[in-house]
Image: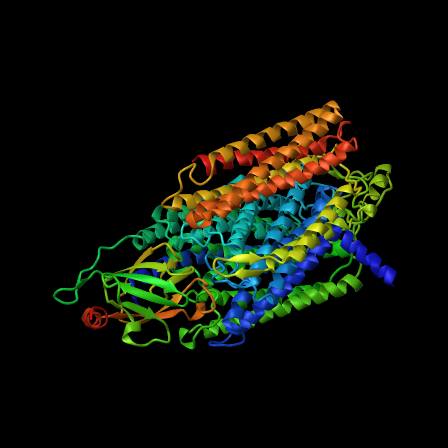
């Protein structure tokens, strides 16, 4: 028994299999869904009658904030990416994600970050200023609890998780598609995920930069958000540049599911499939130029307001095309109204209402009345719960038979839909009518006349919440005793339905092939009979299949979870430390935990890199447009793309406060140009030595390689030595008092750059150790090349920072 | 009933949006319901000729003209809404001329007010009288706590904050402005009906957010002048 338990525990804790990780994501997301839902029900109880006192205002504000943060970051996206993890490799015929251990690490970072967010309730108080974390409420002066530090730490961890997984998915989907599966042949779910990861890659680094600046302000008393020049406006811009794409990030995967499920149950192909894909891409692009509509009342002036009204209204056009195509798909169909179909059709209906009311909010004129009211709350819940959650539940019913191999109870699922749909509208429709009631108020007086509508909404909330018990009961029970589902219960065409339910650990024995005539070949069985739903894709024991079936059995690794755990400990140590004095804030982190985190992190990093973990790279797969680029290199490039945005936002913040400041020190008065010049020279030279290292490795010259690497390491060290000297002399000269904002931007930007240099030097040490053992000189120099990309990037960033701080 | 010029303008625009929204919803939901009922799976209904099946890519279906038609129709509707919005926003962001109310023979008032948000109350300073501060909070009912404005005048508010991010909103007037430190936002209205109206904060600013309420009292001009004389001028 104990042995069996430890085997099960080991499988789930150490797994790197995309299907296991998908299941973990789905279950964890549902757990956070329940937690955040209970917070919401408590808030609805508080608001059910005027002057209620179930919750104090302090606790209410914490609930409202954590509810929002959990639902947006820890429920909507991870729920969708649970499906993406499980289904996408099957649908594109990849054997797993490109980097299975990185995928496991993403999951564990996600789980621990959520734990950290919930822990914040137990350290003073959870964040209590709304999920938008508006500045300057985040300043230490107004939010003195450790809870907000924990919240910021949790957000940093989940951004790390999301960045790792978007790099992973991007490489997988570009490089590992089955032969003949051109991008435009993918169905809508993989397409929606592809568009989503692009948005993630460009939106989340901005958010990471914002949270980092916020955190440094709180921990070290810097001035980005506590100053008038930065303050509210800087946060608003940086946050909403991320925030609006984020709205589509949580919506698109559900739209993709909807657009795949409806055709399956309607028995007709998606109407205007390529226009739907085009619309997704268009909406994603426009989503990056609409953030101003979250600031209509911030006072940007007529021209800006009108411009953002037009872009925001324009973003509704692609969604019109998507909705019309979905409805048109039903024409001359044979629509089977199973639970998955009901939920996805219901999601479309609710999404339409949410979309139409979104046009109201796009109008700056109406915003002068509707901003900050329950009309907004109603609107985005129609999108996020109505569109996303309902669509994702549709996906859950759709793929449940594939994942568990068993059928759920269809009548119970239909009742679940009807009660959910009614409960949803009773809950959220009254909020449209509460268009005068401010959001996030903990209570209201009876003479406002808001009582009846609020009571109605609360009743609806309990109906909707209670209905979800049917879902959990149904799935829990059916997973054990439901009748066997067979491989293709819905008669779907996408690749996952060709496998047995549940699929074997190694997925396909042989990778399916997409032929030019539109047929798909699964292994040896060629030309499937029309409408056949059985016996497809059974293991057929070909020699190729045999080779692949062994991949996953050894795919256990303890390092991803350990790495995530050490990051968790490290951030816990940083965040739960006590402020030593409130004004000016000096900060005392909890060193024992930080030390534990660093040691454990180094151990797991070492274990991770030394572990023999084979990932097969196929050469005959569809990988346009990156045919010549190995997976790892594409991953590095993608990661560096995200880094560009990250540094771009840091530099943008610098320009923001600089242009808002009436005065700025003239060059040479604060930061010594000679220091800057020396550091530039040193770092550029180190790029040369990095190139020489690669050249030596290519030439098979071990000594040359070692000397070049030592040179790179030494020059990196010299750079840091000069930097540290400058830091200490500036720090002791009281520059924060004389030049608060120049000092803030200098220390944060060069500090983040310095951390990148340190990381690069750690990699150099690792490379040196391997080079001394004779590696890299026999044509195996790919790692050196990847390091070079990173190192040159770090140097190029400095080439931008040097003039910013020293010359202009 | 006309309470303020901004409220009348909001109502007109809101109903324009709502009529068009209802029209669009009737078409879209109508189509959806008809399709769902008409094309649902019944005994005897046959499999469509292009039904997607495993082993084949689905047949391409749909015309560019549907997408073009959808975008064109939407663009027409949205253009109407944009034009309506632009008309309103020009009014909202315009800057009306100062009024000139004779308070006494030596004192005039120009209808401008500086509004400052604090955790968790509002301060009002009438232009020209920076030393007399009206503090609006629900607990306070004296003359010094009433934010009075004259009826049928263009009242110009400069809104800012002394601490965190607030949002100043007069519910019935449909007027709002973000209030955050270091920045002054301008907003104006013309109150047409005498009476007391509620001011509330529309941005979460802390535990007192829900009770950050003040009252605005719209008075006939004569009453305003005497109130101003006794409370502000002194």
Residue B65 in the figure: left or right of residue A336: left
Q: Nearer the viewer, residue B82 or B216?
A: B216
Quadrant where the image shows the N terminus of chain A:
bottom right
Res. A753 in view: yes
The picture places residue A599, in percent across and down from the top left corner, at 71, 50
Q: Residue furthest left?
A: B105
Question: Residue A337's x, y, as percent?
Answer: 65, 58
Whether residue B29 is visible to the viewer of this picture, yes or no, is no
**In the rendered image of this protein, does residue B68 appear above or below residue A564?**
above
The residue depicted at 67 percent of the width and 57 percent of the height is A592
Q: Residue at x 47, y 74 (%)?
A: A452
Mark count:
0
Q: Looking at the figure, which quarter contains the C terminus of chain A?
A: top left
The percent coordinates of residue A263 (x first, y second) are: 64, 49
Q: Quadrant of residue B224?
A: bottom left
Q: Is residue A709 left or right of residue A136?
A: right
């Amino acid at each position: 028994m104990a042995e069996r338990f430890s085997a099960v525990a080991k499988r789930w804790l150490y797994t790197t299999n995309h299907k296991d990780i998908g299941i973990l994501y789905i279950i964890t997301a549902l757990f956070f869904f329940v937690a955040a839902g209970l917070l919401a029900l408590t808030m609805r109880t508080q608001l059910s009658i005027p002057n209620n006192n179930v919750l104090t205002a302090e606790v209410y504000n914490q609930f409202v904030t954590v509810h929002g943060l959990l639902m947006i970051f820890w429920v909507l996206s991870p729920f969708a990416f649970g499906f993406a993890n499980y289904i996408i490799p099957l649908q594109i015929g990849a054997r797993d994600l490109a980097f299975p251990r990185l995928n496991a690490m993403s999951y564990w970072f996600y789980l621990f970050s959520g734990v950290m967010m919930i822990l914040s309730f137990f350290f003073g108080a959870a964040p209590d200023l709304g999920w938008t974390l508006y500045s300057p409420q985040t300043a230490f002066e107004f939010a003195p609890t450790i809870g907000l530090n924990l919240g910021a730490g949790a957000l940093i961890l989940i951004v790390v998780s999301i960045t790792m997984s978007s790099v992973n998915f991007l490489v997988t989907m570009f490089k590992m598609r089955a032969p003949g599966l051109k991008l435009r042949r993918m169905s809508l779910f993989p397409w929606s995920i592809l568009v989503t990861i692009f948005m993630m890659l460009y939106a989340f680094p901005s958010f990471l930069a914002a949270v980092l600046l916020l955190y440094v302000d709180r921990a070290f008393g810097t001035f980005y958000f506590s100053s008038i020049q930065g303050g509210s406006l800087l946060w608003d811009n940086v946050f909403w540049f991320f925030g609006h794409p984020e709205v589509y990030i949580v919506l698109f995967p559900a739209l993709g599911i909807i657009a795949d499920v409806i055709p399956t149950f309607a028995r007709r192909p998606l109407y205007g499939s390529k226009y739907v894909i085009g619309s997704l891409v268009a909406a994603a692009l426009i989503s990056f130029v609409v953030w101003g509509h979250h600031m209509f009342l911030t006072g940007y002036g007529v021209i800006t307001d009108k411009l953002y009204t037009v872009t925001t209204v324009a973003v509704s056009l692609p969604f019109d095309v998507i909705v019309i195509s979905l409805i048109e798909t039903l024409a001359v169909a044979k629509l089977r109204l199973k639970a998955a179909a009901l939920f996805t059709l219901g999601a479309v209906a609710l999404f339409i209402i949410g979309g139409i009311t979104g046009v109201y909010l796009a109008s700056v004129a109406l915003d002068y009345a509707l901003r900050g009211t329950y009309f907004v709350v109603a609107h985005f819940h129609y999108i996020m719960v109505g569109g996303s959650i309902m669509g994702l539940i549709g996906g859950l019913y759709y793929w449940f038979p594939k994942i568990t191999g068993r059928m759920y109870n269809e009548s119970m699922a239909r009742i679940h839909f009807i009660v959910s749909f009614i409960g949803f509208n009773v809950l959220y429709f009254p909020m449209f009518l509460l268009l005068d009631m401010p959001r996030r108020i903990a209570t209201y007086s009876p003479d406002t006349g808001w009582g009846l509508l609020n009571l109605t909404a609360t009743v609806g909330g309990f109906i909707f919440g209670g209905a979800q018990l049917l879902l959990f009961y149904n799935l829990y029970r059916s997973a054990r005793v439901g009748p066997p589902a067979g491989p293709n219960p819905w008669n779907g065409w996408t690749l996952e339905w060709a496998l047995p339910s549940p699929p074997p650990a190694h997925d396909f024995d042989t990778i399916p092939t997409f032929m030019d005539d539109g047929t798909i070949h699964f292994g040896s069985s060629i030309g499937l009979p029309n409408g056949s739903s059985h016996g497809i894709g059974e293991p057929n024991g070909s020699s190729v299949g045999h080779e692949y079936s062994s991949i996953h059995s050894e795919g256990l690794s303890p390092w991803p979870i350990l790495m995530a755990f050490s990051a968790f400990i490290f951030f816990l140590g940083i965040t739960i430390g006590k402020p030593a004095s409130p004004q000016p804030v000096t900060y005392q982190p909890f060193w024992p935990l930080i030390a534990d985190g660093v040691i454990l992190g180094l151990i797991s990093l070492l274990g991770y890199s030394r572990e023999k973990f084979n990932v097969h790279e196929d050469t005959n797969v569809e990988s346009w447009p990156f045919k010549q680029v190995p997976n790892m290199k594409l991953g590095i490039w993608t990661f560096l793309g995200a880094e560009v945005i990250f540094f771009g936002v840091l530099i943008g913040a610098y320009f923001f406060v600089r242009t808002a400041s009436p005065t700025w020190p003239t060059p040479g008065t604060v930061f010594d140009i000679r220091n800057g010049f020396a550091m530039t020279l040193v770092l550029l030279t180190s790029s040369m030595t990095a190139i020489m290292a690669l050249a030596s490795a290519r030439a098979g010259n071990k000594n040359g390689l070692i000397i070049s690497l030592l040179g790179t390491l030494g020059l990196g060290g010299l750079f840091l030595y000069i930097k540290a000297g400058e830091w200490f002399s500036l720090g002791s000269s009281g520059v924060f008092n004389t030049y608060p904002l120049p000092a803030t931007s200098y220390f944060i930007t060069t500090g983040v750059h310095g951390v990148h240099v340190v990381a690069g030097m750690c990699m150099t040490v690792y490379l040196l150790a391997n080079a001394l053992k004779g590696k890299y000189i026999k044509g195996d120099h790919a790692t050196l090349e990847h390091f070079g990309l990173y190192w040159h990037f770090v140097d190029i960033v400095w080439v931008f920072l040097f003039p910013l701080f020293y010359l202009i | 009933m006309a309470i303020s010029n901004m409220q009348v303008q909001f109502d007109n625009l809101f109903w324009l949006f709502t009529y068009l929204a209802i029209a669009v919803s009737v078409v879209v939901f109508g189509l959806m319901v008809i399709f769902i009922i008409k094309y649902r799976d019944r005994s005897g209904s046959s499999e469509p000729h292009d039904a997607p099946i495993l082993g084949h890519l689905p047949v391409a279906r749909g015309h560019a003209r549907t997408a073009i038609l959808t975008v064109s129709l939407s663009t027409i509707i949205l253009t109407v809404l944009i034009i309506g919005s632009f008309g309103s926003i020009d009014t909202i962001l315009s800057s009306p001329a100062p009024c000139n109310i004779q308070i006494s023979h030596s004192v005039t008032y120009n209808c401008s007010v500086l509004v400052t948000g604090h955790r968790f109350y509002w301060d009002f300073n009438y232009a020209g009288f920076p030393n007399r501060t009206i503090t609006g909070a629900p607990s306070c009912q004296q003359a010094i706590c009433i934010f009075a404005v004259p009826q049928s005048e263009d009242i110009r508010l400069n809104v800012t904050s002394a601490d965190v991010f607030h949002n100043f909103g007069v519910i019935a007037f449909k007027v709002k402005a973000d209030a955050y430190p270091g920045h002054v936002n301008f907003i104006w209205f013309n109150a047409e009906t005498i009476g007391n109206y509620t001011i509330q904060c529309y941005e979460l600013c802390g535990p007192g957010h829900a009770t950050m309420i003040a009252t605005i009292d719209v008075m006939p001009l004569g009453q305003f002048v005497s109130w101003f004389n006794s409370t502000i001028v002194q």
